[in-house]
Image (spheres, rainbow, N blue to C red):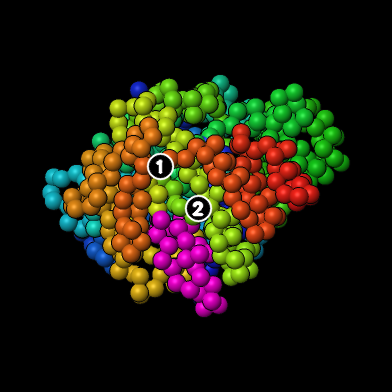
Amino acid sequence: MRMKPRQLVSLWLCTGLIACSPDLPQPPAMDVEFTSPLIEAPDSTLRNIDQGQLTGLVQDNGSLAWKGIPFAQPPVGELRWKVPQPPEPWAGTFSATDTIQPCPQFASTLSAGIADPDGDGIVGSEDCLYLSVYAPDNIPEGESLPVMYWIFGGGNNSGYAGDYNGGVLAQSQDVIVVTVNYRLGSLGWFYHPAILEPGASGAAASGNWSTVDTIAGLQWVRDNIAAFGGDADNVTIFGESAGGGNVMSLVTSPMAEGLFHRAIVQSGGIGTTPLAQGVNFRDDDVPGHEHSSQEIINMILVRDGLADDRDSAKALQASMSDEAISDLLYSQDAAAFLKLYNPEAARNYPAPKKFTDGTVFVEQDPLEQLASGEYNQVPIILGTNRDERRIYLYAAMTDVIRNDPQEYIRFAHYPSVQWKWRGVDNLARRMAPAQDEPVYAFRFDWDEQRTSDSGLDMAVAIGAAHSTEMAFIFGDWDVGFISGDALYHAETNPGRDQLSAAMMSYWSNFAYTGETGTGRDGNLPLWQPWQNGEGSPKTLILDSAADGGIRMMNEGVTLDSIKADFMAEQWSDPQNRCRAYRATFAGTTAFDRDEYNGLVEGGCAAL
């Protein structure tokens, strides 16, 4: 099997899940004029927006694209940890033809093709708050199309909007697609009182800079999307993995109220972090995260030779003024700052995110918030892929795949179905009775991959793994962590293409009407809303006709049902039972240390 660099998969991919005017505060603008060279371009792409005149390009399939439009001022210098500021107008005609570049992140498969000229393992730029707009080429005069606002995934530590082209979806379904960048990792979520402006409050004192980036992008859509043929009163937010989690952040954030009208969550979830975890020392009475802002300051002081160890750094930090701490943090080079979190330069690194500040996120457990109905109630789709976790496992388990494929399937099943519980069933059960708008659920099951050149059955190794549904929704077979020749072959491509067309039809009908129904053309199986209660409709299975086709499933899962099935399972290798238990239940209320140690003869503890 020959794979492009961006098709290779890191074993440590992470979802990043754990959790009346929305205008943002607007301090005085920086004295910088955004300029772009005058160009000659097709009249069909000429548009006028609040910032000025711009042109885009006509893509191969006929769709129109405007790439790399700034929706906020660059969050650099004194704006690094500030709410996004309104973009500056430009002189002349802006050429919106450049692919959006990433925000700073460790180089990985999700940044393949992005240059790392200094070889430090960090790619991207802090000047990264841009979005792209894709539209069909034949919008009737005076008509406004639904807007689909895409939030990419990557653990909230990596990825970028420029990796997604909405042209096929826009052209085939008559929708406007917007893809948006947002700040990542500790440059996107970071809180310390010293970095705040005097008297800062609300979002400006939240530490949730990245979440507010996605809100600022929605505000830009509200104010400008009509110029591209979009309807600002019909916006669907959708995202995958960490992007799906970010969609749920907007669903639960009071700041996003009124900025969107439907939501689609693909392989997402929900979760927030207490503000104390983001700032406190790890040995405080209320412990902070190991990479809280105060712990990071300790690391800077030791790294720079200003303190010998953590204890002396902690004492020095206690003697520093807020101004000195602020100067220290804002003076940090982005690459050096990120490496404090992960000296090994892996794509993902542990850092607190999504702080319950009382403005961006309410100070309530998000699951309780959903059950109360106190959130932005809109029609919503929740979904996962049947084999989510195989993408994390297959590279380390090729021998098992070859020699005992059923053991591999068994191993991957339980953490994958736990993801369905966490990202779909556990949310739908709370939301369906709490809101009048429909709640829909799906499971993506397509697994008709080829056998690799080395003889590995990719239908078993990958199957309906994490991210594989994105290509079907975008109609772009290079989208996803694994794509192209690694997944597809001529024999099954007709069924693949038919399923893709069906999924785009469901997604776009939802964008138009707030209902999935029988798709935009009215010829697909009826996708019924989730209903609580045994035997009631719950989840739409998305699969090709060769594997049972598109159909409703009435069964749901709970953490208890997953646990019962797991404990009754027979395993070829006792060690796999231990590892699968940990992969499925660690971090949940179902994890029982004594039960774990007693799973196999001799116990699991030695593992």
Residue bearing mark 1: 555
* Residue furthest to the left: 141
Q: Residues within 10 Å of mark 1 (few under 14, many from 20)?
A: few
Residue sitting at x 44%, y 68% = 449
x and y percent of residue 282 in the render? 74, 32
Q: Secondary structure at mark 2?
A: loop
x and y percent of residue 27 in the render? 47, 30
Between 86 and 227, the residue placed more toward the observer is 227
**Magenta stretch: includes residue 473:** no
Most frequent secondary structure within the magenta stretch = loop
In the image, the segment drawn in magenta is 445-472
Q: Secondary structure at mark 1?
A: loop
x and y percent of residue 361 in the render? 49, 28
Q: Residues within 10 Å of mark 2 (few under 14, many from 20)?
A: many
Between 246 and 436, the residue placed more toward the observer is 436
- Which of the two discs, 1 and 2, labels the residue nearer the N terminus? 2
Residue sitting at x 47%, y 40% = 557
* Residue furthest to the bottom: 453
Q: Is residue 502 visible?
A: yes
Residue bearing mark 2: 388
Residue sitting at x 23%, y 52% = 524
- Total labels: the figure holds 2
In the displayed structure, 32 sits above or below 395; it is above
Q: From the viewer's perspective, is the residue at label 1 or at label 2 nearer?
A: 1
Q: Is residue 543 left or right of residue 298?
A: left
